[in-house]
């Protein structure tokens, strides 16, 4: 079951008094225990009601009241969202919480409605389908898409090339021989035992992941990375560097959409589009 655990406001929280460093450290350890147990899904502290507002509904009318609000005992100063097996489990976790306020305080636990609670009102499943779609959209809105490149046995060479030519910053890198679990027998092409299993590097603000893969058959057909640089000079230098040992697919030049744009495939078979953002000022 899902529950919301609400930290009730107190005089100190409504006065905007900040918690002590010691309390922040204690709460940090408590939150870490919740995360390690797979219980905590979210948690935030709330600013005093003087910084908030309320909107009241009367039919089609809406009225807004700005904070502060008088009844401190009815206010919330923070919350967690937990996934637990039962209300009893939530109670046991709440009892372990450090007192979140300098004075006496109270935490309230409230179960959250879930789709099955509305089954009788949704016989055709339309409401549940809508909720599932919205949940997926919310999840996707916070997702990240990152390129993952397979170099077919030349990953280490490629990383060094991009470090020299593009100033790439090489981060994590480990080999199949360093895997915490044995690589399944027959997965690797002979000679790949010491190749790169996983690596990460950064070019500008783009974080890219890379690997040698399990064999030498990798290719980048139908795929390019777009490299945007601030000046014509920087774009031309980067284009020339990537072209060393590679193939120029479209010479870098002025276009109606960019002061410089060109396409090149580097010596590892990875395609690039190099450009300067903005329309050509001469056009």
Image (cartoon, helix red, strand yellow):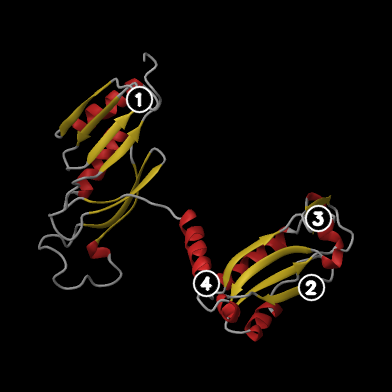
Q: Residue 201: where, in percent of width, then height?
A: 34, 46
- Residue neighbourhood size for the residue with mark 1, other residues' Cα within 10 Å, grouped as few (<14), some (14–19), many (≥20): some
Q: Which residue is identified by label 1?
A: 257
The tag earlier along the polypeptide, 2 or 1, is 2
Residue 136 shows in this picture: yes
Proximity of marks 4 and 2: CB atoms separated by less than 8 Å: no
Residue in the picture at 81% in, 55% down: 49
**Which badge, 1 or 3, comes first in the chain's sequence?**
3
Taking the view exactly as shown, the residue that stands out farthest to the left is 190
Task: Looking at the image, tell me whether mark 2 or mark 3 is earlier in sequence order.
Answer: 3
**In the displayed image of the protein, which residue is found farthest to the right?**
70
- Residues marked 4 and 3 touching at CB (< 8 Å): no
Q: Quadrant of residue 157?
A: top left
**Nearest the camera: 188 or 126?**
126
Real-space Cα separation, disc 2 to disc 3, in angstroms:
17 Å
The answer to whether the residues at label 2 and label 1 have Cβ atoms under 8 Å apart is no
Which x, y percent locates residue 100?
75, 67
Q: Which residue is mark 2?
A: 106
Disc 3, SS: helix
Q: Is residue 125 above or below residue 278?
A: below
Disc on res. 49: 3
Q: Write the residue at 74% across / 68% down.
A: 7
Q: Which residue is mark 4?
A: 128
SS at badge 4: helix
Q: Is residue 206 left or right of residue 113?
A: left
- Between discs 4 and 2, the one toward the N terminus: 2
Q: CA distance from mark 4 to mark 3?
A: 34 Å
Quadrant of the rendering where the N terminus is positioned? bottom right
């Amino acid at each position: 079951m899902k529950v919301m655990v609400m930290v009730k406001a107190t005089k100190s929280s409504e006065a905007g008094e900040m918690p002590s460093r010691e309390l922040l450290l204690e709460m940090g350890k408590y939150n870490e225990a919740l995360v390690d147990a797979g219980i905590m899904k979210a948690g935030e502290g709330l600013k005093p009601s003087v910084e908030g507002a309320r909107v009241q509904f009367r039919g089609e009318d809406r009225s807004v009241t700005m904070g502060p609000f008088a009844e401190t005992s009815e206010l919330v100063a923070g919350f967690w969202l937990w996934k637990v097996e039962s209300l009893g489990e939530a109670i046991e976790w709440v009892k372990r919480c450090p007192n979140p306020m300098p004075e006496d305080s109270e935490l309230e636990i409230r179960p959250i409605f879930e789709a099955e609670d509305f089954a009788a009102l949704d016989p055709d499943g339309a409401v549940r389908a809508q909720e599932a779609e919205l949940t997926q959209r919310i999840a996707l809105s916070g997702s990240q898409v990152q390129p993952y490149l397979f170099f077919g046995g030349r990953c280490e060479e490629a990383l060094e090339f991009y470090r020299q030519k593009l100033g790439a910053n090489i981060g994590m890198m480990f080999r199949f021989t360093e895997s915490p679990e044995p690589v399944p027998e027959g997965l690797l092409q002979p000679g790949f035992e010491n190749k790169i299993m996983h690596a990460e590097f950064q070019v500008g603000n783009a974080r890219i992941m890379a690997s040698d893969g399990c064999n030498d058959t990798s290719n980048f057909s139908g795929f390019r990375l777009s490299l945007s640089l601030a000046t014509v000079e920087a774009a031309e230098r980067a284009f020339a560097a990537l072209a060393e040992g590679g193939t120029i697919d479209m010479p870098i030049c002025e276009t109606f959409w960019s002061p410089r744009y060109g396409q090149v495939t580097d010596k590892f078979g990875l395609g690039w589009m190099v450009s300067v953002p903005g329309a050509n000022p001469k056009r």
